[in-house]
Image (cartoon, rainbow, N blue to C red):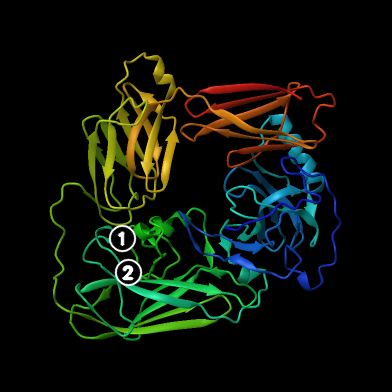
Amino acid sequence: MKSTFTRSLPVVAIGAIALISIPAIRCGRYRNNPLHRPIELAAGFGEIRPDHFHLGADMRTDGREGLPVYAVKEGYISHVSIQKEKYGKALWITHPDGTTTLYAHLSAFTGKAAQWVSNRQYQQQSWQQETDVSPAAFPVKKGECIGYSGNTGTSEGPHLHFEVRNTATGKSLNPLATVLQVNDTVSPVIKALYWYDRCNSIYEDEAHAMDKNNTRCSSPFIGIGITASDQFATGRFVTGINKAWLYKDNVLQYEFSLQQLSAADTRYVNACIDYARAVDKGPVIQFLFSLPGNSLPYTRKFASGGTIDLSDRKQHEIKIVVDDVAGNRCEKRCRMQYNGSKPCLSPSGTTHLLYPQHTYQMQSAHATVRFPEHTFYDAIPLLLVETPAKIPGAVSTALTMKMPAAPVHNGFTVRLQTSLPERHALRQRTVMLLSGKKGVTILKGKWIQNKMEGLFTDTGTLQLVADTIAPVITHLQLEGSYIQFTCTDNLGALASVQATVNGQWLALDQKNNTFRYQKEEHYPPHARILSIMVTDVAGNVTTRKYTL
C-alpha cells in the first residue's frame, strides 16, 4: 500500500517491543474486525503485485501508526516474525476452527509476547526473528489487543495487512469471504481489452488494443487480456480482481478464481500478466489464457488453455465476465474475426530459443549460465553478449543476457570469469552486480576457481566489481528517548549493522536505510559511548564511536 503519512505514536515504542498489556474488550459491531473501526480497504486479496499475488487485505489506518490491533478469534500466538522486509513485525494466531490469522507491518507487540520476543532478541543479539511459538505460551482471547499498527517491512505507508490461512495447508484464504464484513455494492469495472498473437511467444508480441464492437485480428489464434478493477462502497481505493470467465460464442474458454493461494505458487503472477508492460510502469494487463509454463492451480483447465481459435475467418462473439467476492458482476461483449493476413507459422530456427519445462546451459567466452527446468513461462529468444566493462572497479567483462523483458520463475545460476589473478587481495572484496529491469542486484557469490557463481531471479547485464569503498554513517540523532541514524553504501548493499552502548548490544529497528533504537530496559543506566559498526556485502567495514 502506498500512502503519505504522519507519525503518531502515543503508546508505541518503535525499535523496541512495547511492554503494554491491554485487556480484551467487548467487540460489539466490530466482532470480526482486527481494528475495531469501520473497515476501509486499500488492497484486496489476489491483487497483482511485483512477483506475487497479494495474499491478504490491507486495511487503512488514516495514515497513522499506533492503532490497537485485536485478535478476531480466540486462539494462541503460533509464530512471530520481525524482518526488515516483507511483513516487518508480524504475528500469527492459530484458532480452534482450523484457521490461522496473520497481522503484519505492526509497529509493536504487546504483553508477555512482547517481553518474550525482546528477551530472545538480546539473547541472540539479532533484531530479526523468525520463530514458531509453543501453543501453551501465549493464549489469546477474541478481542484482545495483540499489537499496534505500523509501517514496518516493505510497507510503503501505515496500514494493517491481514491474512486468513488454512492451518493444515498453509494456503491463504480470501479474508472477505471468511472473516471481514465489508459493505460492497459496487460492481467491478473492465476498463480495456487487448489481444495477443498466440502463434508466437508472448515475449515476441505486444498487446493489441481491441475495438469495443468489432476487432479484426491478423492472427488465427489469439489470447485475450484485460485491465480491470474493483471498488468497495465504503472506500475510495481501487483494488484488483480475483474472478473472471471468458466465453467464445457462449462456450466457456477460460476461468480463474483466486479464492485461496499458496505462497509457493504466488510467483506465477508473472505468468498471468503482460510482464513487459508492467515493469515499464504501464497498465497491468491480466491474461485470460494460460502460458505453457504457468502451473498455477487456480485456473480451470481447458485443452486450448484459453487460446481463441479464429481460423475459420468467421465472426465470433467474445464475452468476459468479472465477479467480486460479494457477487457484484460486470461483463463486456465484443466481436472478433481473423482477417487472414498472417498464417500461423512455426518458429524460425533460432539457435537460442529457450522453452518452458526444459533445462538449458549456455556459454560465452568467459561465462556459463544454467537455467533449471520451469524457469520460463513461454519461449524466450536469448543471446549472451560480452563487452568490455565500463563501471569503476569492474574486474570482468560485462555479460548481457540479451532477451525481451520477461520474468523467470526459478532462480538461475551464472558463473563469470574474473580478470584478477588467483590470489589477488581484491578477490576478497569482489561482488556480482546485475543491472536488470527491476533494478540493481548485488550479491557475494562463491569462487569456483577463476569464476564467481551466483543465483539470480532477474536478467540484465552482469559484472564482477571489486568494491573497496566502506559504507557511510550519517544523520545521527541522539534525542532524549531514542537513537537514530542512516547507513548508505556506494553500491547500495548493506550486509549488517550493529550498535552498542557501553558494550551493550542494541536492538535496532530497520526501515530501508534508517536505523532506530527506542530506549528501553536493556539500555545501560550510565551510557557513555555509542559504537556503530556497518558492513557492506563486499566486506568493507565502517566503525564509528560517539560520546553520549
Residue 464, picture quadrant: top left
Q: Residue at x 26, y 55 (%)?
A: 379
Q: Nearer the viewer, residue 77 or 393?
A: 393
Q: Crowding near pointer 1: few (<14 within 10 Å), some, many (20+)?
A: some
The answer to whether residue 396 is left or right of residue 432 is left
Q: Report the residue at 72% width, 61% height from top.
A: 96
| SS for dot 1 | loop
Tell me: residue 446, above or below residue 32: above
Q: CA distance from mark 1 to mark 2?
A: 8 Å
- What's the amino acid at mark 2? Gly
Q: Residue 255 at what x, y percent from top left? A: 41, 73
Residue 452, compared with residue 65, is above or below; it is: above
Quadrant position of the N terminus in the picture = bottom right
Q: Which is nearer the N-term, disc 1 or disc 2? A: 1
Residue 140 at x, y = what percent?
A: 79, 55
The answer to whether residue 294 is seen in the rendering is no
Q: Nearer the viewer, residue 469 or 339?
A: 469
Task: Tell me the amino acid under the disc marked 1.
Answer: Pro
Q: Which residue is mark 2?
A: 305
Circle 2 Cα neighbour tier, 10 Å, few/some/many (<14 / 14–19 / ≥20): some
In the image shown, does 186 or 53 lie closer to the viewer?
A: 186
Residue 521: percent from left, percent from top: 82, 34
Mark 2 lies on a secondary structure that is: loop
Q: How many marks?
A: 2
Image quadrant where residue 126 sits: top right
Identify the image quadrant of the C terminus. top right
Q: Are marks 1 and 2 in contact (CB under 8 Å)?
A: yes
Q: Could you tell whether 533 is left or right of 423 in the image? A: right
Numbered circle sitting on residue 85: none
Q: Mark 1 — residue?
A: 292
Q: Residue at x 37, y 14 (%)?
A: 424
Give coordinates of residue 216: x percent, y percent: 22, 79
